[in-house]
Every structure is written in structure tokens, then in C-alpha cells.
Amino acid sequence: MAELIKMPKMSDTMQHGIISCWLKKVGDKIVPGDILAEVETDKATMELESYEEGILLHIGAEEKSVVAINEIIAIIGEEGEDITHLYSTSKPSKADVVPAPMSVQPILASPDPITLHAKSPLKNSDIPLHITHTATEKSQHTTVCSGRFYASPLAKKLAKEKGYDLKQIVGSGPHGRIVKEDVLRATFVQSSSTSSLENGQPLYIDLPISTMRQTVAKVLTKSKSTIPHFYLTISIRMDELIELRTKLNLYAPTKISINDWITKAVALSLSSHPEINSAWLEDKIRSYNQAHIGVAMAIEGGLVVPTIQFADKKSLLAISKEIKILHEKAKKKKLTPQDCSDSTFTISNLGMLGVESFTAIINPPAACILAVGAVQKIPIVQDQQIVPAHMMQVTLSCDHRVVDGAVGGEFLSTLKGFLEEPLRLLM
């Protein structure tokens, strides 16, 4: 009996998903555990796993389409099973249904515009150029997914020289294989599209807004608009920590970063200042007994905040290893909702990019977020003398509904003490 595959709710805030790509095609045999597709949610790109066994009889949602929660996206059943009554009630798409033997497929010849993105030599950004292929050409195109696509070696070489993204070129070869002529056709269109340029530069570039970016925009706009932020900045001397870190990294199985030390110091500081480790819940203030530290990470297309659970109970080395694992998952867009949930405090570190200081927007419902700047070697006054020192500025953004200035200042003082006497973090 055929089973309906519906769009699952993959995160607590998810309202819909976008089918990034299908990893299976109609007619494929499916067993439990097979990955059917990659789905972009508001937090990450995740794999859609099958719990059914049978033949993939129908795909009900095209790639890049927006699908609401519980909407039918596929049907799995027995080979030859009649499922017309099932998929006709779902939203039909251009996705194929397993054809009956000897069936005749209609051939369409209406033009279907495809957009190719070429690299600008001046801004290294995408210049939208338009290519027209027939619908029959498009139907031959093999789906691109996570870098998996078919292209001849010559086509790859030529596209690389031209700065073209092969994922944006429709292949006309067997099974959608991209061949030399497809790339040359794109080259010809580029040479005839100079009217859209001014002094060699594009007039403008329109970029699509991903679900992740839409969520970031919505959450942070609401945070900045509704939460009464105030900011406290303190300078921390990092000489002892840098010296101790250098010695430990000679023996540590994994290199411990300054951000790992900061995460541990924040977690321990929160234990002494529960008012900072709190959340505004409209009708009450919730004070947490554990420190779940969200670590903001920039990835392609947006920002994610995976969480180090119970950071106050973990060793410095354990925190370091966990952050590295989460960072790799974030780069590959493999974070799960569990990886990004339940943070009680957030750290945003731009110091590795050379940013000296900045203010961050609170990540609700948490009451505070810490913005970390770069460690700089600068002259300071010590014992009436000017001496060089490694200094770092951090800025605490506070929700004034929960935290008062004195409370925020006391937290920063405790944090400063831990980082300036780093041996305490190893006890």
C-alpha cells in the first residue's frame, strides 16, 4: 500500500521548508534509512530520511519550491501501483510520476528562460545573464545537488576559466550532462549582454533571500525593535592567557582557541550571576541553573548559533572539541535543531576578523549576548610606566527588562577575573 511522505517539522520554529535537491528519482527503490532529499529549513539544510520501503512512485514538489508543513512531497509504494487518486489531491508539479509501459510523453517546445551567473572581474559578484533553452532541453538536465552533477572535463575546464557556476548551466547531453557547447552558448550570451553593464560593472545584482536569511532578519528585527538594549564594555588583559594557551597547545590533542577559553570563562561566570543567565518570557523571568552557551557562526547564506550544552560542567578541552565539531557541521549545513536549541546566553566573536569592538543584537529569549573583539598588543600604563600588553575588548548587550547596569557590570568583572587569571579555568 502506498505511503504518503509529507514535509516534516524539522525545527521548533519551522513553518515551511524548501526542497534544496532530490537525491532520489522516480522509479528508484527505497529502503528505510535512505536519504530522499535535502531540505532547507529556517535554521539549516537537513536530510530527509525515509522510514518506508518500496518504489519512489511520485515526487510532488519541485526543487527550490517552498513546501508547507505536512504537505505531500512524495509517494512510496509497490511497483506498478495505481496512485493517481493520491497525488492528484496533492499539489502537482512538473516532477514525473512513474510512467506506464509504452506510454508516450508529450514534447513541449515553449521557451523556458534560465539564468546564468557569471563572475564580475571587478567585484567578483554575480552578473545575471539570461539564456533560453527549450523545455525539452530542461527536462534532460540532471539535477544539481551538493556539488553532484554531470559535466564533461572540457566543460568543467571551460566554465572554470570563464568563472561560470556549472550548477546554473542546463546540460544538453545524455542524462543532462553539461558539454562544451552548453558553456560556449553561455559565453555567447555574455558577449551580447554588455548593454546591462556600465563601465564594465553590473548596474545591480538581485540576490535571492534564503529561508535562513529571512529568519535571521525576522528574529533580529523583532529583537532590536522590542527589546530595550543597553551596552557595557570592558577591556581585559590577555597576556597570561596567551602564555598559558601557548604552553597547553604544545601537549593538547586539539588546539585550544581563545574563543574556547572565553566560552569556558563565560559559562563559569554565569554560575555566579544567574540574573545574566535568564530569559524574558513576557509573563515571567526565567532564571536558568545551567549554562548552555550559543556560539554564533557565520556560514554561507546566513548565521547559525549552535549550542554548547552544560558548558559550565565541561572541561576546556571538551568545549574546544565540541565547538570544532559544530563548526564543521555548520560549514556543511548539517546542523540539527537539537544542535541549535536551548541556548541561555550567546557569544559572538569577530576578533578573528580583526574587529576591535562591536555591539551585538540579543538573541531572544536570552537576556544577554557578549560581543568579543580582537586581541591587540597596545601600550598601557602599569606602575607608572608604559608597557606593551595584549588587550581585548568585550561588550555585553543586555535586556534592560531583565538586567540592570550594576548586574551586568558585576558579571563583566567576574569574566575579566577568569580571563586574566586563566589557571582558574582549569580547576
Image (cartoon, rainbow, N blue to C red):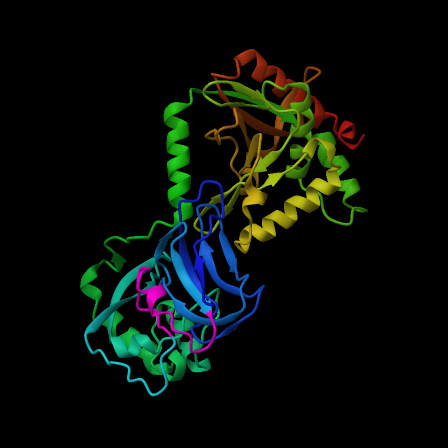
Question: x, y (%) of residue 343?
Answer: 57, 34
Where residue 329 sits in the image (x, y, percent)? 58, 52
Q: Quadrant of residue 423?
A: top right
Give the main secondary structure, helix, strand or loop, of the magenta stretch: loop
User: In the image, is 344 to the left or to the right of 140?
Assistant: right
- Lateral position of residue 116 relative to residue 51, left or right: left
The number of numbered badges drawn on the structure is 0
Tell me which residue sits at (43%, 54%) in the image. 7
Furthest toward the top, the residue is 406
The stretch drawn in magenta includes residue 86:
yes
Taking the view exactly as shown, the residue that stands out farthest to the bottom is 102
* Location of residue 14 (image quadrant): top left
**Image-quadrant location for residue 165:** bottom left
Q: Position of residue 103 (x, y in %)?
A: 31, 84
Residue 178 visible in this rendered orientation of the protein: no
Residue at position x 38%, y 58% in the image:
124
The residue that appears at 81% across and 47% down in the rendered structure is 251
Give the x, y percent position of residue 407.
58, 14
- The quadrant of the image that shows the C terminus is top right
In this orientation, does residue 408 appear? yes
In the rendered image, the vertical position of residue 137 relative to residue 165, given as above or below: below
Classify residue 96 as left or right of residue 410.
left
User: Does the magenta segment cover residue 343?
Assistant: no
Closer to the camera, 145 or 154?
Answer: 145
Closest to the observer: 252 or 58?
58
Magenta extent: 77-97
Q: Is residue 128 left or right of residue 305?
A: left
Q: What residue is drawn where x is 37% and y is 85%?
A: 101
List the single residue furthest toward the front: 1
409 in relation to 23, above or below: above
